[in-house]
Amino acid sequence: MNEKFIRITWGALGYKPNTLQAEILRSVRDSGNRFFLICGGERAGKSITSVAAFFMLLDPLQEGDYTYWIVGPDYAQARAEFDYIHKAFTTLGAVTSVSMPETKTQPWILKVQIGDWKATIETRTSSDISKLASFTVHGVLMVEAAQQLYEVWLKLRGRVAETRGWVILSGTLENGLPWYSDMLERWEAPNDEAGVSFSLPTWSNTAIFPGG
């Protein structure tokens, strides 16, 4: 991992992980897993922690063209994470183009370049699962994952299979589909799915609740 790149991008976001968030990010760095589930309460900091993990999994010292998706139940719910990523790359001066239409029915697309490393980050909606097929990507943020169908997770896992890429799932249990809580419990223990899960209770976000 490129520690300088991580430090700069986190700094651009004003992000300093608290104790529980730091445990998650250490696992992203050290565990060797490819799939990470971050279940958080409202205002627990799961979105920005997922984005912090996203930057840890990038390697701008590599050459080539890379594609990353932010997949939500609809386009609008994928935009908070996109905003964080756009802000960090803008601070780096790495943005080559960006499209952010106001309508909620179109994707946002960001293109960046650092040396010989190029990347496209785009929002996707899982409202039509068939549109997630037949693409190869290098990494995915699956946001509000508990509101999406299990079949969406399977599609996304398939999209990163060829590249040996990764998927970060984030969401809350409230009003979530059963598969998400089942996976949270299953991935808390050693498993053969290359997955690991974490819980971030609301009170753990000391930036908002200084006393815990």
Image (cartoon, rainbow, N blue to C red):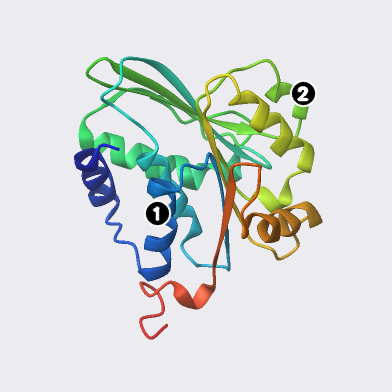
Name the kind of residue labelled 2 in the image: Ser
Q: Earlier in the sequence, mark 1 or mark 2?
A: 1
Question: From the viewer's perspective, is 4 left or right of 157?
Answer: left
Q: Position of residue 132 (x, y in %)?
A: 69, 25
Amino acid type of the residue that numbered disc 1 sits on in the rendered structure: Leu
Identify the element where label 1 is drawn.
helix
Q: What residue is shown with label 1?
A: 25
Give the residue displayed 73% in from the left and 34% down from the top: 154
The residue under the point 46% across, 62% down is: 45
In the image, residue 66 lies at what x, y percent? 43, 20
Residue 140 makes an appearance in the image = no
How many numbered circles are shown? 2
Which of the labelled discs sits on residue 130, or is there none? 2
Q: In front here: 43 or 56?
A: 56
Q: Residues within 10 Å of mark 2 (few under 14, many from 20)?
A: few
Q: Quadrant of the C terminus?
A: bottom left
Q: Residues within 10 Å of mark 1 (few under 14, many from 20)?
A: some
Q: Quadrant of residue 63?
A: top left
Q: Secondary structure at mark 2?
A: helix
Left or right of residue 21: residue 90: left
Where is 191 relative to 94, above or below? Answer: below
Question: Which dot marks residue 73?
Answer: none
Residue lying at 21% horizontally and 35% vertically, measured from the top left: 92
Residue 116 shows in this picture = yes
